[in-house]
Image (cartoon, rainbow, N blue to C red):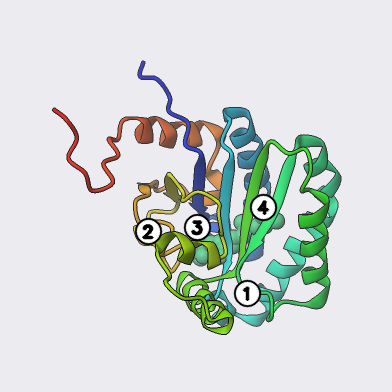
Amino acid sequence: MQELKIPTHVAIIMDGNGRWAKSKGMPRIMGHYKGAEVAEEITKASLDLGIKYLTLFAFSTENWNRPQDEVELLFDLMKNYLTEKKQQLLELGVRLRFIGRRDRISKDLRRLMENLERETSKDYKITVILAVDYGGRDDIIRAVNKIVRLEVKDIDEKTFSHFLDLGDIPDPDLLIRTAGEKRISNFLLWNLAYTELYFTDLCWPDFTKEELIKAIQDYSKRQRKFGRVLDE
Ligand code: FPP
């Protein structure tokens, strides 16, 4: 069997929670509950596999347009889950970081995020980046505004990246999207420029460690050229 090339950074669009719940005759929020458990399982699997960065798209700048009760329940779920799992994250060696806007989320959650970022920043084996109220275009616009405000001159790609939410974190090597949709949906627009894309029809609540390994096996076969011509 071909050797598994472990990507340094995996990004995931966790899609299909609603469809999964509907197919089981359950309310949509149950799909998000199961989705959070799967996010935890995939964090542990990524840690076992030696992945260094895992970025999960939890809530997009467009998700505010969902029914208000779903939005509220989703934020409650995130808040409760993160509060409950803090000790476990520390024991496992998971450093948490958040990307996205912070000005539209509740003060409680904002405080929790800051607290988790601070407390998990020592002795970690993996960095899990949760994208909450995140949009790729919004990320770029915020970066431009920071640059203008600071009057930084002679911006090149490297210095520009520094102002984006992922900052100096290396670009994702592999993007996985579940539930059959084949689009980027305003996720890390700048950082995905050379990322390998992997799509699966499975809904996120059905995604497993074995499926993650399957995606990495597929990724291992790809030849990454970054626009160059490789020697024959
Ligand atoms: C997309 O499925 C999923 C989301 C918008 C939310 C993802 C959030 C989680 C899995 C919870 C994360 C929580 C923690 C603590 C990490 P969808 O609702 O768009 O599904 P559909 O397309 O089938 O309707």
- From the viewer's perspective, is 142 left or right of 194? right
Please rate how many residues cluster around mark 1, counting C-alpha atoms within 10 Å: few if below 14, some from 14 to 19, many from 20. Answer: some
Marks 3 and 2: CB-CB under 8 Å?
Answer: no
Number of numbered tags placed on the structure image? 4
Q: Position of residue 182 (x, y in %)?
A: 34, 58
Give the residue drawn at x 39%, y 46%.
Answer: 200
Q: Which residue is mark 3?
A: 16
Separation of marks 3 and 2 at Cα, in angstroms:
9 Å
- From the viewer's perspective, is 49 left or right of 160? right
Amino acid at the residue labelled 1 = Arg
- From the viewer's perspective, is 74 left or right of 133? right
Separation of marks 4 and 3 at Cα, in angstroms:
13 Å
Q: Is mark 2 within 8 Å of ligand 1?
A: yes
Upstream in sequence: badge 3 or badge 1: 3
Disc number placed over residue 101 in the picture, else none:
1
Give the residue drawn at x 51%, y 38%.
Answer: 8
Which residue of the protein is positioned furthest toward the front in this rendering? 153
Please rate how many residues cluster around mark 4, counting C-alpha atoms within 10 Å: few if below 14, some from 14 to 19, many from 20. Answer: many
Q: Which residue is mark 2?
A: 181
The kind of secondary structure element at disc 4 is: helix
Marks 2 and 1: CB-CB under 8 Å?
Answer: no
Q: Is mark 3 within 8 Å of ligand 1?
A: yes
Q: Quadrant of residue 183?
A: bottom left
Q: Is mark 4 within 8 Å of ligand 1?
A: yes
Residue 200 position (above or below residue 73): above
Upstream in sequence: badge 2 or badge 1: 1
Q: Quadrant of the C terminus?
A: top left
Disc number placed over residue 36 in the picture, else none:
4
Upstream in sequence: badge 3 or badge 2: 3
Separation of marks 4 and 1 at Cα, in angstroms:
21 Å
